[in-house]
Image (cartoon, rainbow, N blue to C red):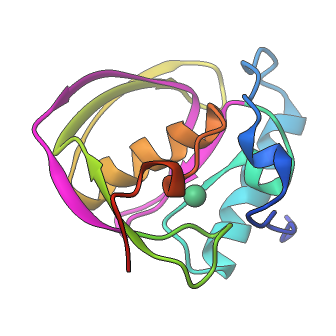
Amino acid sequence: MAIRKIIKGGDPILNKKSRVVEKFDDRLAQLLDDMIQTMHAAKGCGLAAVQVGVLKRAVVVDTGDGVVELINPEIIDKKGVQREQEGCLSFPGEYGVCIRPAVVKLRAQNRRGQWCFYKAEGLKARAFCHEVDHLDGVVFKDRWIKAL
Ligand code: ZN
């Protein structure tokens, strides 16, 4: 495992769309292990592969109740609205209010390629939406309604 360098705002790679993961191999496992270590070292609650310079549809989230690995995630349902403060490891020290669904349902593959289903609310729902946005080249500053 290794801590990777987190790409900061202003780098055009953060606006690129990530590619679908097709190979569930040791290289993917290594990437996920490194992303988890990098996220924890930076005290973040989510990290997308693009933030370490890899344009693959893979994210890791840990909102305090364990790591979730989402490969090729798709939001399949959303309900309600929440307006809360967000930050991003690629934009240290910057915070803004984003509008997100209150509850999301999502499907994603795990590191072995099996499809899994998730339901999240509150902080975890925000983290899922924030990270899925990264895979489409969208950063939270594109969505914030107020800078803090
Ligand atoms: Zn982010």
Which residue, as the protein is rendered here, is positioned at the far bottom?
93
Q: Is residue 72 magenta?
A: yes
Q: Residue at x 85, y 64 (%)?
A: 1
Question: Residue drawn 84% across and 56% down?
Answer: 11
In this rendering, would 133 be left or right of 27?
left
Residue appearing at x 16%, y 45% in the figure: 102
Q: Position of residue 73 (x, y in %)?
A: 51, 27
Decide if residue 75 is on the left or right side of residue 93. left
Vertically, is 93 above or below 130? below
**Above or below — where is 132 with respect to 99?**
above
The number of discs equals 0
Horizontal and vertical percent for residue 83? 20, 59
Q: For ligand 1, which image quadrant applies? A: bottom right
Pick whichever, 70 or 7, lies toward us.
7
The quarter holding residue 104 reads top left
87 up-or-down from 17: above or below? below
Would you say residue 73 is visible in this rendering? Answer: yes
Q: Is residue 76 above or below residue 70?
A: above
**In x, y percent, where is residue 105?**
27, 29
For this view, does 46 lie left or right of residue 50? left
Single out the residue that lies furthest toward the left.
80
**Could you tell me if residue 69 is visible in this image?**
no
Magenta stretch prevailing secondary structure: strand
Is residue 4 located in the magenta-colored stretch of the structure?
no
Chain part drawn in magenta: 57-85
Quarter placement of the C terminus: bottom left
